[in-house]
Amino acid sequence: MSDIVLDASALLAILSQEPRARRWEDTVPDAALSAVSLSEVVAKLADVGMSEREIHDSLDLGMTVVPFDAALAHAAGLLRPKTRSLGLSLGDRACLALAMQMGLPVVTADRAWGQLQLSVDIQIMT
């Protein structure tokens, strides 16, 4: 059972061992991650030159990857008007929709999320 939902930015901060992410490292095995967020993380790691094997190994952390199904696609789409002014991506909205669906807090490294007025507990890495 997951305790939190991780945004791609949060997982990248943890993988990069950023100081602000240290308090969240132990939560990863108990975290849920949208398949869309996983794709974003894989893309960022590939961009910095990691091999497919290195990416796979670095992401073998025990978190639960949740498929992006029709219900989550619909929920993420409906978040667009509430998040457009902050420039949130599809991946961001998929993450938020997952947290809302699961009734879990979401952790992000993106400070702009602090301005959102949604029915989800947003915890920002500081």
Image (tube, rainbow, N blue to C red):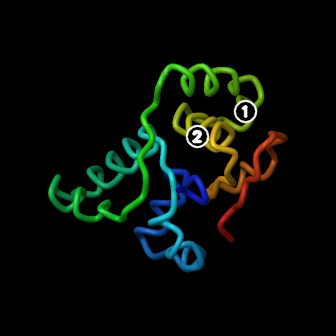
Q: Which residue is mark 1?
A: 83
Q: CA distance from mark 1 to mark 2?
A: 9 Å
Residue drawn where x is 46% and y is 31% of the image: 68
| Most distant residue in the right direction | 117
Q: Looking at the picture, which amino acid does disc 1 mark?
A: Thr
Mark 2 neighbour density, 10 Å: few (under 14) some (14–19) many (20 or more): many
Q: Is residue 112 above or below residue 3?
A: above
Of the pair 16 and 68, the residue shown nearer to us: 68
Mark 1 neighbour density, 10 Å: few (under 14) some (14–19) many (20 or more): some
Left or right of 84 on screen, residue 22: left
- What is the quadrant of the C terminus in the image? bottom right
x, y percentage for residue 7? 55, 51
Left or right of 109 on screen, residue 53: left
Number of on-image labels: 2
Q: Which residue is mark 2?
A: 92
x, y percentage for residue 63? 42, 58
Left or right of 42 on screen, residue 90: right
Q: Dot 1: what SS?
A: helix
Q: Looking at the picture, which amino acid does disc 2 mark?
A: Asp
x, y percentage for residue 36? 44, 37
Q: Is residue 64 above or below residue 13?
A: above
Instruction: Tell me whether circle 1 and circle 2 mark residues in contact (CB < 8 Å).
Output: yes
Residue drawn where x is 53% and y is 69% of the image: 27
x, y percentage for residue 37? 46, 44
Left or right of 39 on screen, residue 74: right
Q: Dot 2: what SS?
A: helix
Of the pair 88 and 120, the residue shown nearer to us: 120
Residue drawn where x is 60% and y is 60% of the image: 3
